[in-house]
Image (cartoon, helix red, strand yellow):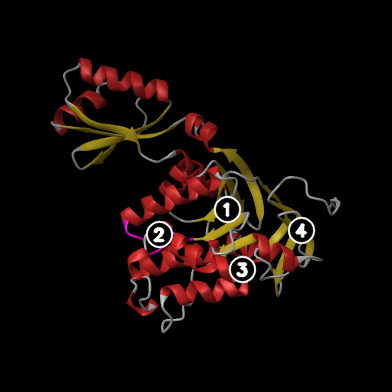
Amino acid sequence: MAVRPDVDSGHAVEAYGVTRYFGEVAALRGLDLTIPYGQVTALVGPNGAGKTTLLLVLATLLAPDSGQVRVAGYDLATHADRARGALGWMPDTFGVYDQLTVDEYLAFFADAYRVPREERSRRIRALLSLVRLEEYLGRPVHVLSRGQKQRLGVARALVHRPRVLMLDEPASGLDPRSRVELRDLLRSLAADGVAVLVSSHILSELEEIADRVVLVDRGGVVGVHDMTELTAAGPSGRTRWRVRAQDPAALAAALAGRPGVGEISDLPGGAEVGPLTEDQAADLLAALVAGNVRVTGFAPAAGALEATYLAMTEDG
């Protein structure tokens, strides 16, 4: 492991050669990772890949067995307390103090982070507005739904205006509208220069939020991709495509008579074909329309991030 000097390199998070064992089981195996400011980074991997262990280490809640970790420029081995003041953390499950009101709940954490008393009330109101809970000001936490408690958890993580925000499964329990609002909030925070690190199993949501994706498997980073490049090219440039038509029988006949469409699988109202490149898919769509097949739907069977994840897990 190459030990880095204890200086702020400009990265929000740096991890070098990080290992963590639970008994004889290695959760992290010499993991290297950097997270930039001003972007949303998605952390993706199968169950048991080490994502939650990594987040707990970065959040200063779990000490690594070896390696060096810095958050907001602070080495966690020597200045974990300072790092905590610069990061916001939202775990996948967390307890709330049900008998407190929502503003008392946030005030408790504001006090823990030493937010100046004269700023506290204004900041709490701004946070409740930010997460669409302003109507619950003064009401007890126990009246909130699960999704609303998730949003309260986001507000709690932001109460001290962190430079680094880490969220583990933040969309769990959120309805579709709340997920859109969460996406917009995270994008807004990144635009303001905050480093956002999100772990989630909802890959379609991550694809809409993230600027970059870090693939984790078997306790190590196995790939880092810029989302714009990933979306444009996909992991291999080829993917399965779903086609739907007003007359499924006519579609099936047209596909059966055309070479180069790959494996054809029946779907309700259509079929799945491929894998095809985007050019091949465009040629197929043009041919179907020219053949008077009334196509009502034509799209990749999986998003770029999902396709990359599936390719990674298949290789394993």
Q: Quadrant of residue 276?
A: top left
In the image, which residues are magenta?
169-175
Give the secondary structure at mark 4.
strand
**299 sits left or right of 102 in the view:** left
Q: Residues within 10 Å of mark 4 (few under 14, many from 20)?
A: many
Q: Are marks 1 and 2 in contact (CB under 8 Å)?
A: no
Q: Quadrant of residue 279?
A: top left
Q: Please state which amino acid type lies under the numbered disc 4.
A: Tyr
Q: Position of residue 268 (x, y in %)?
A: 20, 43
Q: Kindly report which numbered mark, 2 or 4, lies closer to the viewer in this rendering.
A: 2
* Spatial CA span between label 3 and label 1: 27 Å
Most extreme residue toward the bottom is: 99
**103 sits left or right of 316 in the view:** left
Q: Please state which amino acid type lies under the numbered disc 1.
A: Leu
Report the residue marked by disc 3. Answer: 116
Q: Kindly report which numbered mark, 4 or 3, lies closer to the viewer in this rendering.
A: 3
Q: Kindly report which numbered mark, 1 or 4, lies closer to the viewer in this rendering.
A: 4
Q: Please state which amino acid type lies under the numbered disc 3.
A: Pro
Question: Of label 1 and label 4, which has the lower sequence position?
Answer: 4
Most extreme residue toward the front is: 118
Question: Of label 4 and label 3, which has the lower sequence position?
Answer: 4
Report the residue marked by disc 4. Answer: 74
Magenta stretch holds residue 262: no
Q: Position of residue 289 (x, y in %)?
A: 22, 19
